[in-house]
Amino acid sequence: MGMTKRIVLLGAPGVGKGTQAKQLEDRFGWVHISTGDMLREAIRSGTELGKKASQYVEKGELVPDDLIIAMIEKQFQNGKCASGFILDGFPRTEVQAKKLDELLSRQGAPLDAVVSIEVPEEEIIRRLSQRLTCKEGHVFPEDSEHKPGDPCPTCGAPLSRRKDDAPETVRRRLEVYKQQTQSLIAYYRAQKILKPVDGVGSYETIFNRILEVLGIASGSV
Ligand code: AMP
């Protein structure tokens, strides 16, 4: 029998939220909801939302709450989330967090856990300065085996550097995280669902730490 979990992955840019969310989705079938991936897709395909969001995303600023909340509400309307979900990159402000609480309590299905992934800032800057991604959000460090334009080893789509991974934009994104998102740690600690996890190590190690705080034995499916 599948187990249902409703999880938020919280943490600064570059701590590995997307990578861990994908692992959780593959392993348990919970839907991975990445507002960043959704916005990049909207920008690529030139939708109205994409046109409104691009100026913010490019500068590393937050997209206005009303646009993000509308996007999230749509996700929850299609029913796919009923068997569990992992939110990655949402909520990022207290307004968003309160809206999420409201939405979930209306459905009688509150969050089970908020996993806060912790990585020192120097390590984040180092990771983002060499991050290559594809449009599916798979991540590889740029090295002798992975170069921009190469096919993604996981899905074959071309790898590239994210524009907002440029050093000045990374600095801005980290500042925005501290100013607007970090307080959510205290918000969820007060709700007694905060699970801090050390985000330094291999992705398998971190995955196991996440399973542990979720109370799932790493052998079980
Ligand atoms: P991410 O891929 O999560 O790093 O998100 C990339 C960019 O998308 C962010 O720097 C913001 O500009 C925008 N974004 C993603 N999620 C949100 C959100 N929940 N609220 C506001 N802006 C967001």
Image (cartoon, rainbow, N blue to C red):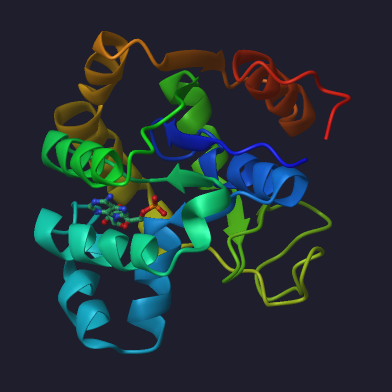
Q: Looking at the image, which residue is at 45% across and 45% down? A: 88
Front residue of this view, candidates 198 and 170 = 198
Tell me residue 174's x, y (percent): 29, 35
Extreme residue toward the right, this view:
219
Quarter of the view holding residue 132 = bottom right
Q: Position of residue 116 (x, y in %)?
A: 44, 22
Residue 61: x and y in percent read 19, 52
Classify the position of the C terminus by image quarter: top right
When the figure is inspected, residue 8 is found, relative to residue 210, above or below; the finding is: below
Residue at horizontal 51 percent and vertical 33 percent from the top: 15
Left or right: 4, with 211 as reference point: left
Above or below 167: residue 127: above
On screen, residue 198 above or below 121: above
Q: In terms of image quadrants, where is residue 79?
A: bottom left
Q: Is residue 190 left or right of residue 17?
A: left
Quarter placement of the N terminus: top right
- The residue positioned 66% from the left and 15% from the top of the image is 215
| Total marks placed | 0
Figure check: 96 above or below 124: below
Question: What residue sits 76% from the left and 44% below the top?
Answer: 27
Q: Position of residue 178 (x, y in %)?
A: 22, 27
Comparing 188 with 180, the one in front is: 188
